[in-house]
Image (tube, helix red, strand yellow):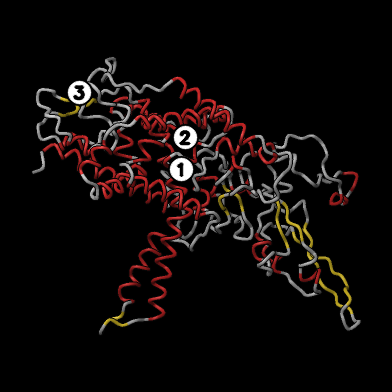
Amino acid sequence: MRRPRSWAQWLRRFTQAAFLLIFFALLLGMRSKEGRELSPFVNLFFDLDPLVLLATWLATHTLSGLSLLALITVAASLLLGRVFCGWVCPLGTVHHAVSWLGTRRRKAKTQLADGAWSPWQRTKYLLLLAFLVMAIFGIHWIGMLDPFSLLYRSTVTAVLPAAQYAIEDSTTAVYQADPRLGPLRATTVTEPIYEFFRDHVFKTSRQTFAGSTVIFLFFVAIVLLNLVRKRFWCRYLCPLGALLGLCSKRPVMRLKNDTAKCTNCKRCVLTCPAGAQPDAPGEWRATECYACWNCVAACKENALGFAFESPLRKPTKAQLDLKRRAVLASGFAGLGGLLGLRLTPKAQATKFNPALIRPPGARPEREFLQRCIQCGACMKVCPTNALQPTSFEAGLEGIWTPILVPRIGYCEYECNLCGRVCPTEAIRPLPIEEKHKVKLGLARFDTTRCLPHAYARECLICEEHCPVPTKAIYFVEKEVPLRDGGTRVVKQPHVDPELCIGCGICESVCVFKDRPAVRVSSAGESRHTGNQPILPTPPDFGNYGGNNTPETGNADPYG
């Protein structure tokens, strides 16, 4: 029979489900069919994340684009312990659900070992220290393991596209086959399902992302680790959990174990997902406890309960006890990671990668990497699916940050959504008028493939799609010889470097789909003074500016 105190468990379960639904509702609502409406709470979970706030401040020494709502999370941890991990965190809820499924298949002896505290749980604190040391020196890699960045990135680039592919293709197959089930058609069931997901969940055409398989496998791996040990990620690896654990060393709400009533039955340990030692009087680990109330509900002797005490008193004798050698090793690992990521030509930008085309409003590369948390929000809202996660175009430091890939999509001229959803302003929220002036790169024609240049065939598609008011692509009529000895006048396209903004639409719509005849590179991008192959037209040279020699000065490659 359930004890009355289990009401707290049901309240926690309801809260977890509510925040998980809010998370997905905000993610799915990032872009409607029209592609312009945004919820004012679109970055709510990032705003509540003190780890993003701290790491970005350490890396950039500014709080621009960040919300101080994260202080609410810190205050709650100081008062109530790691309630954020146990009641709010959406990724924690996913882990909790999978852990519950795994627990049902385990024997009691195995469950007892799962619930016990392990010294390996200190690992997350050492990981946190290493990442913060890297952040101090400008390497903002916290987004790799931050739970909100991880869940956003995995859902946007892998989980949601996979679900959309499965639902759309399966219902389409049923529609085309039109099978009958007696007097009924299968489409009477599948079509309402398809329409619901199309109108209320997916809302837009299917997105695809390069490298999504790796991101998906990483996500699946950390979820399946819950079958090895309950809430494995939260207990051993989560850097946000480590930060909140440090804030929870002396909470006001504390677990009390009445030794006069406790029979040491270990039921509390069987249900503890955190390894917080609820069974050991005076040894409860406040830094690990999620305040889930499982142990209180499981205790048949009424020996456990939460009570409020002064934060000035130590909650228990149990200490975090991070070994000095481990702390030093973690700090040096952070420095080693710094050197490993920075001592490469790409990281030091001695040369520019032509494929590294950043979204409009992206800050100079070094500052961009000091802010970007690889969350994938900008990729989700991009209406043309042009923004993709990098592999190694920006080096290992910039892995899974956004780049524009013109072969997949282009930068919509009247869109600035990527800057409006970026939680750290790695991409600045530019007004449309200012965004129109930003150069992402520069287009160029491959005359060995372009139809008018190479084959004397008319083609106007790139010029027709060029979005700038005064077309950046113009035509020069040229008489070209034909095989039969005659000639033909064709309009050959050229790029005006002063007008081209590098949006990529010309490359995206080119009739050559294997390798477009017009291609955009990062050359000429506004954010880098050093990546300018064409100087502005000098007044004395008239219209001769297109043939100026490349810039040779020692300009800062990061602008």
Query: Looking at numbered disc 2 in the image, what kind of residue is underneath it?
Result: Val
**Residue 292 on image: x %, y %:** 24, 36
Secondary element at tag 1? helix
Q: Earlier in the sequence, mark 2 or mark 1?
A: 2
Q: Which residue is outermost to the top? A: 312
Q: Left or right: where does residue 290 sit relative to residue 444?
A: left
Residue 77 higher or lower than 166, as above or below: above
**Residue 293 on image: x %, y %:** 21, 35
Q: Quadrant of the N terminus?
A: top left
Question: How far apart are the two marked residues, 3 and 2, measured between alpha carbons?
Answer: 35 Å
Which of these two is toward me, 157 or 213? 213
Residue 544 higher or lower than 60, as above or below: below
The disc label shown at residue 52, or none: 2
Secondary element at tag 3? loop
Q: Earlier in the sequence, mark 3 or mark 2?
A: 2
Query: Looking at numbered disc 1 in the image, what kind of residue is underneath it?
Result: Ser
Q: Which residue is mark 3?
A: 281
* Quarter of image, res 112: top left
Task: Report the residue at 45% width, 19% height from top.
Answer: 324
Question: How far apart are the two marked residues, 3 and 1, measured between alpha carbons?
Answer: 37 Å
Q: Earlier in the sequence, mark 3 or mark 1?
A: 1
Q: Left or right: where does residue 68 sit relative to residue 454?
A: left
Which of these two is toward me, 142 or 298? 298
Contact between marks 2 and 1 (CB within 8 A): the answer is yes
Contact between marks 3 and 2 (CB within 8 A): the answer is no
Q: Which residue is mark 1?
A: 149
- For label 2, count other residues whose C-alpha is less than 10 Å away and answer few (under 14), some (14-19) or many (20+): many
